[in-house]
Image (tube, helix red, strand yellow):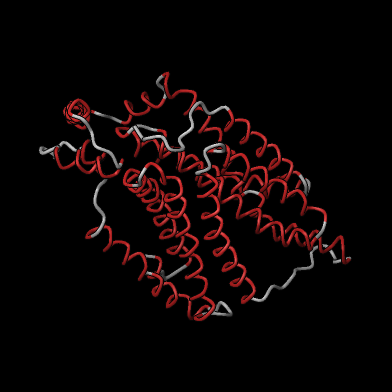
Amino acid sequence: LRGLWMSYQVFIIFRIIIGITIGVIIPIFLNIYGEYAPTKYRGLLLMITWSVFGVGATISSSLGLVILPELQKDKVQMYLLILTIFPFLGFISCIFLLNDSPRGLLLSKNIRDNRTSIQALNEINQKELNSEQEEKLRDEVKAAEIINESYSFKHIIKEMFEPELKKTTVLIILIFICLGYNAFGVYSISSYFLDYLDEVENGKKEGEERETPARDIIINQIMFGVAEFASNYVGGFVGEIRKLGRKGGIMIFTILAGILIIVGLFKKILFEVTSPISSGFNTIYVNLAMDYVVEIYPTKIRDTSTSLLFMIYRISCFLSNYISLGTYEIHKFIPYIIFAISTVLICFFTWGLPYEMVAKEMK
């Protein structure tokens, strides 16, 4: 759709539609892949999946460097049309190559021969189920058939706040609100803050615009794409360290991202180095938190619960831009003070999560 834009207004409408579809695709795809992944390496494989976003960003920016290095308006539509090849390939892959997960099949009321699904579960968990476990699974399937006929959104929300999951759900909501601000808030004002540091260090006149060549902007995007690709691999390995776990990984990279941002506030050359690295660490702890959500909720509510929490995160990301820009106008350091407070809160809420999911089977 975006490749067919005819005006700025149409482009915005199509971009909103794309944003909605991404919000639908990401949680469901992660759930399917997470249920297929062996328990022992699930966290690592999910983080590798996230790294593909960095690959896509790098490819699209590299194509931009070749096709429209000076951001020529007359070549934008051709560039966007070329990019439609990738979602088209994804669409074809989903239709012909992607199957529902075994646990999803177990909950499907269309499945009558449950033996196939049980065998698939055996392969995933790399163990044999005894007759008692198989019988228990069959009972769950029968219950699932009833659930699929009557399970409403209201029931799913109720289950998310059942005593066993209530504390987890509340803390994850608070974590995702803070993650949304940290993920986009201060990074959305980076160019403004660089101008401020330039003004302080070089006597640059207030209001004087800095002209950044289009090629430099695109190269910067490529660097961020490569950083996202690499950082997810690092996060995947760290998240599988049992003594740290998902929770420890989230807290460590949250603290590192916060330290790097604060260190860079007092020198332009430091800020130019620490901000992209901090963004990479930010990617790690956001995605580790997403993976934790995929792992923590039981099959029958997993899709809806992860999608709902992802929506809360996206709303927070959207609002963070306006909060950062508004507070920046009041005082240039206020957005970074909020970032520091949010960083502490993320660590505190993560520490309070009652469950750890490293090497634990999904329910």
Q: Position of residue 180 (x, y in %)?
A: 56, 44
Which residue does the image show at 51% across and 33% down from the upper left? 173
Residue 211 lies, with reference to residue 181, above or below; the image says: below
Tell me what residue is drawn at x 70 percent, y 37 percent: 341
Residue 216: where, in percent of width, then height? Answer: 64, 74
Along the viewing direction, whichever of 224 and 255 lies nearer the viewer? 255
Quarter of the figure that contains the N terminus: bottom left
| Horizontal side of residue 227 vs 85, given as left or right | right
> Residue 36 vs residue 216: left or right?
left
Q: Nearer the viewer, residue 32 or 17?
A: 32
Direction top: furthest residue: 163
Marks counted in the figure total 0
Horizontal and vertical percent position of residue 279: 62, 54
Left or right of 229? Residue 308 is left
Q: Residue at x 57, y 27 (%)?
A: 352
Q: Position of residue 50 (x, y in %)?
A: 46, 54
In the picture as drawn, the residue positioned furthest to the left comes out as 112
Quadrant position of the C terminus in the picture: top left
**Camera-nearest residue between 220 and 331:** 220
For the view shown, which residue lies furthest in the right direction? 203
